[in-house]
């Protein structure tokens, strides 16, 4: 133990407590959200079957989650299969800075929905609070353009919960636990999409 570590502090216990809290949060998600998560996967699979795509967006850690989940579709989650079209609207810094400069930060995602979104696509909004103004603006634009809208949310869902068609609200107020659950939910959706679109993968 470091000389600077308070004698009453146990780093191992802290790590164990953090991991156990993450497990409890995911168990709550499994108990409360399995059905709507499955519905989200079915919506995404239906969009891909129809030639559509997914568009994902969020701020900070949620931006990283958007890019992570999009990469599971454009790349692969497990066994090799056809690439699936998915855009993380957070990934192009020229887009974000140009739109932010010309239209304001609140429109960085809605402008990209306008550019890339088509009826039948699926917009996946990610926000731990559910109150990010630029995410709210993007969901409004997605609905105007008749995209399906899914929210990966937390802390009660915030303003976004009633705005999206399908709100997946992690039952936690802890930002870190919510973010960990969002990635788990993203993986669950992606795995389900693979099983629905490529049933032969289950036998490979």
Image: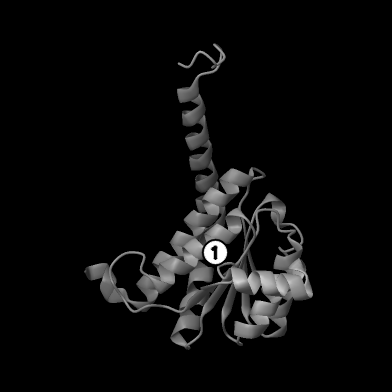
Camera sees residue 138: no
Residue ID at (63%, 81%): 147
Where residue 96 appears, as percent x and y from the top left, is 65, 70
Camera sees residue 81: yes
Residue 56 location, quadrant: bottom right
* 21 in relation to 189, above or below: above
Which of the two residues, 80 or 39, is positioned nearer the viewer here?
80
Q: Quadrant of the N terminus?
A: top left
Residue 90 location, quadrant: bottom right
Residue ID at (44%, 60%): 187
Residue ID at (42%, 73%): 74
Which of the two residues, 75 or 121, is positioned nearer the viewer here?
75
Where residue 2 appears, as percent x and y from the top left, is 48, 17
SS class, disc 1? helix
Q: Quadrant of the C terminus?
A: bottom left
* 51 in relation to 197, above or below: below
* 176 in relation to 77, above or below: above
Where residue 51 appears, as percent x and y from the top left, is 47, 88
Q: Which residue is mark 1?
A: 66
Which of the two residues, 50 or 92, is positioned nearer the viewer here?
92
Q: How is the image coloured?
A: one colour
Where residue 10 appears, as percent x and y from the top left, is 50, 19
Tell me how many marks there are.
1
Residue projecting furthest to the left: 204
Decide: few, some or many residues near mark 1? Use Cα within 10 Å; few <14, some 14-19, many ≥20: many
């Amino acid at each position: 133990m470091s000389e600077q570590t308070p004698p009453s502090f146990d780093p191992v216990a802290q790590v164990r407590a953090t991991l156990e809290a993450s497990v409890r949060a995911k168990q709550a998600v499994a108990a409360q959200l399995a059905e709507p998560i499955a519905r989200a996967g079915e919506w995404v699979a239906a969009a891909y079957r129809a030639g559509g795509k997914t568009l994902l967006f969020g701020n900070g850690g949620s931006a990283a989650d958007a890019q992570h989940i999009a990469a599971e579709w454009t790349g692969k989650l497990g066994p090799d299969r056809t690439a699936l079209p998915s855009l993380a609207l957070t990934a192009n810094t020229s887009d974000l800075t140009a739109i932010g400069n010309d239209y304001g930060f609140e429109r960085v995602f809605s402008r990209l929905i306008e550019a890339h979104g088509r009826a039948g696509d699926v917009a996946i909004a990610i926000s731990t609070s559910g109150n990010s103004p630029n995410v709210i603006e993007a969901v409004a634009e997605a609905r105007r353009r008749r995209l399906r809208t899914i929210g990966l949310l937390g802390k009660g869902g915030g303003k976004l919960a009633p705005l999206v068609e399908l709100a997946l609200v992690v039952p936690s107020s802890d930002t870190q636990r919510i973010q960990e659950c969002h990635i788990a939910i993203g993986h669950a959706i992606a795995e389900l999409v693979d099983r629905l679109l490529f049933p032969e993968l289950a036998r490979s």
